Amino acid sequence: MPDPKLGRKLAEPLNDPEPETEGLAAAAEKNREREARLRIIDAFGRLGISSDQWPDFVRAFYTDQQQRIVYHQFMTPSPFQPPDFDRLNESPQDWAKVADSAWALHRNRFLQQCEDWVRAGVDEKIVEAKHARGTGKKAPAPVGSKRRGGNTPIDRRYEWAAKYLLKLPLKEIAGAEADATTVGRVAREIVRLAGWATK
């Protein structure tokens, strides 16, 4: 059973007393959507596309502060007290091992309590966000080649999504260095993540 002293707080934005979302999972989804939208807007800036060229729904999001709220659920673990250090009978290295072990135990108990809230049905399970892949370890494909070589940098993917929202043809977005099918798949996935797929 979860410990009621865990310091649970409901998902709430720092600057809005009445969020439009319901539940923690919905709040986490809104945060991911907001992040994707802001990255697309950054991509418009990098591409030199002025706001008067953005789709109306992008401009509406950018100008409405209420749509850019960040939701939080702060949980405070009980204070951690490291073990005493007996300088006369233990080395700093020995104490560090004992202290690290004590911290790991304390940390893991706290995380277990958080999981217990979910199992008890008091909290919702939060789906973890997909982490952006890196640029890869392989050498980049030569210019003019459609071979990927490495993963496309995240900023480039958001630039594809920004151009996709402007309804540019996929072949034009991909250019000579990328495959239009891949570009379309990546751009649509980002636009869906931003909640703009039906716009």
Image (cartoon, grey):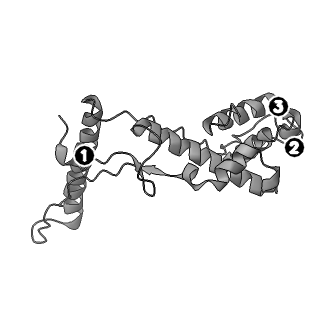
In the image, taking residue 49 as reference, residue 137 lies left or right, namely: left
In the image, taking residue 5 as reference, residue 39 lies left or right, namely: right
Residue 148 point in image, percent of width and height: 76, 36
Can the viewer see residue 150 in this picture?
yes
Of the two numbered discs 2 and 1 in the rendering, the one whose residue sits closer to the viewer: 1
SS category of the residue bearing label 1: helix
Residue at figure coordinates x 24%, y 40% from the top left: 113
Of the two numbered discs 2 and 3 in the rendering, the one whose residue sits closer to the viewer: 3
- Estimate the spatial distance between the alpha carbons at disc 2 and disc 1, rounded to whole Å: 51 Å
Q: Nearer the viewer, residue 191 or 132?
A: 191
Q: Please give the residue where the numbered disc 1 appears in the rendered image.
A: 110
Q: Please give the residue where the numbered disc 2 appears in the rendered image.
A: 143
Give the amino acid at mark 1. Answer: Phe
Residue 127's tag is none
Q: Image quadrant for the N terminus?
A: top left
- Estimate the spatial distance between the alpha carbons at disc 3 and disc 1, rounded to whole Å: 47 Å
Residue at figure coordinates x 50%, y 38% from the top left: 29
Of callouts 3 and 1, the N-terminal one:
1
Of callouts 2 and 3, the N-terminal one:
2
Residue 35 point in image, percent of width and height: 58, 48
Give the amino acid at mark 2. Answer: Val
Q: Nearer the viewer, residue 83 or 156?
A: 156
Mark 2 touching mark 3, by CB under 8 A? no
Residue 25 point in image, percent of width and height: 43, 36
Residue 180's tag is 3
